[in-house]
Image: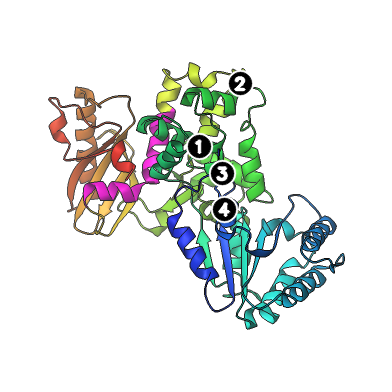
Amino acid sequence: MKHTLIGREQEVKLLREYLNTDKSEFVVVYGRRRVGKTYLIRQVLGDQACFSMTGMENADMGDQLSNFYFSLLRVWPSATHPKSWIEAFYQLQSFLESLPEGRKIVFIDELPWMDTTRSKFLAALERFWNGWADGRSDIKLIVCGSATSWMIDNIINNRGGLHNRRTHQIYIAPFTLEESRRYFKAYGFGYREKEIAECYMVMGGVAYYYSLMNPKESVAQNIDRLFFLNNGELVNEFENLYRSLFKKAGDHITIVTVLAKKGKGLSRKQIIEQSRLNNNKKFTKTLEELEKCGFIRSYIPFGETKRDILFQLTDAFTLFHFHYIKENKYQDETFWTNSLNSGKYRAWSGYAFEILCLNHIRQIKQALGISGIQSRACCWSSKGDDSHRGAQIDLIIDRADQTVNICEMKFSRSDYEITKSEAEDLDNKLDIFLRQTNTRKSLMLTMITSFGIKPGIYSGRVQAQVTLEDLFK
């Protein structure tokens, strides 16, 4: 089947605009591994690039230079094997100068892999851009890389010779639910919204993971084949993902391991205590890198200050790894299918649905009719004691119009029925929240469910509803 570019309309529009300006452009495209960055760029460029190459993973400087040489040799027979990156970029400059007038597009993929130890790659890139390309009007340099933290630190936020030199940056995010639906429809899948949401809750909207699915199989069959079958294509993806993004991924994995156990998140102090990592600048940088790459988010709980900031896991695939892949101790090749009616599935799906909702706050606000109102999404909790029960609210939308949406998120297979005990629990949460926070804002109990609330004796407590269909808009 011919590949189709799904979504990405704004990103395509921007990239085409940058390619058609009357000045030289240094465009940085970044985003996590497997999200479709390279595919998007190649779809837009077609055969327009004068020179393109891809960095090699885990290769030393000598092999990277050889890779550059052979890539240049394909389009310029006069190329010679460079001994340094300064020489390599000088040869690229000479090749581009030999071309007729008109725009000259250079595409370098997986740029971070080329910056090997003591290679002086960045210095050579700086010289190429600052000393030559930037002074012209016809060079379009597009660089791309999956090591998001490297791209941000070394190119986008560079404090050296490349400081403020990149002219544009484009972040390629994972698919939304709506883009996921469009993908599955384009490739002949008959999945409905709930099944697509389940795919998202497992794979986090990552295009490459979707591409490995078979439209002739159910969601459960696909998940078992990819993640639990012996030698399944995504069995080792977790390690590959983190190792490709971070040069030393041990601490990153330790932190997400701890956060995967706590839905509302943990403070810096709690992460250090539970991970046993050292409280130093390296720890701070690791947290920053995880957040830049979209694996975690930091937020201030309702009614608290910056010193009370919490860090929360927001990557669905990482959660799935810890709740399922790592727990498959007996190498059960149908582990997913066998757990669909279990407490394990219910616990995972509840947490995963919360992550899905966090990643679709814009759609939730739109469904509630509050898109134009300034707000922030956070959590809140209160420990119980002898005088009152504890309470936890996993999603609060704190609005500037003196209203707070207290959100309950429930992933179910049919209309959700509020029982007497759940109604009492909701009443308890609202009561404790009011007493503990002393807020003067109005509270609006909001249910975010798969198919809506089943009418009943306790359903009248709910003042606003959002369904799964709303999240696909």
Picture coordinates of residue 427 (x, y %)? 19, 34
Determine crowd level at label 2: few under 14, some 14-19, many 20+ residues with C-alpha closer than 10 A: few
User: How far separated are the C-alphas under marks 3 and 1?
Assistant: 20 Å
Mark 2 or 3, nearer chain start = 3
Considering only order in the chain, which callout, 4 or 3, is on the residue closer to the N terminus? 4
At label 2, which amino acid type do we have?
Lys
Residue found 65% across the figure and 51% down from its top: 246
Residue named by callout 3: 255
Is 470 inside the magenta-drawn segment?
no
The residue identified by callout 4 is 37
* Residue 466 vs residue 463, the one in the foreground: 466
* Residue type of the residue flagged with mark 1: Met
Which is closer to the viewer, label 2 or label 3?
A: 2
Q: Nearer the viewer, mark 4 or mark 2?
A: 4
Which quadrant, please, contains the C terminus?
top left
Name the residue tied to disc 1: 203
Q: CA distance from mark 2 to mark 3?
A: 22 Å
Pointer 2 or 1: first along the chain: 1
Helix, strand or loop at label 1? It is helix
Q: Nearer the viewer, residue 289 or 69?
A: 69
Q: Which residue is mark 2?
A: 329
Q: Residue furthest front?
A: 100
Kindly check if marks 2 and 1 are in contact, taking CB atoms under 8 A apart as contact: no
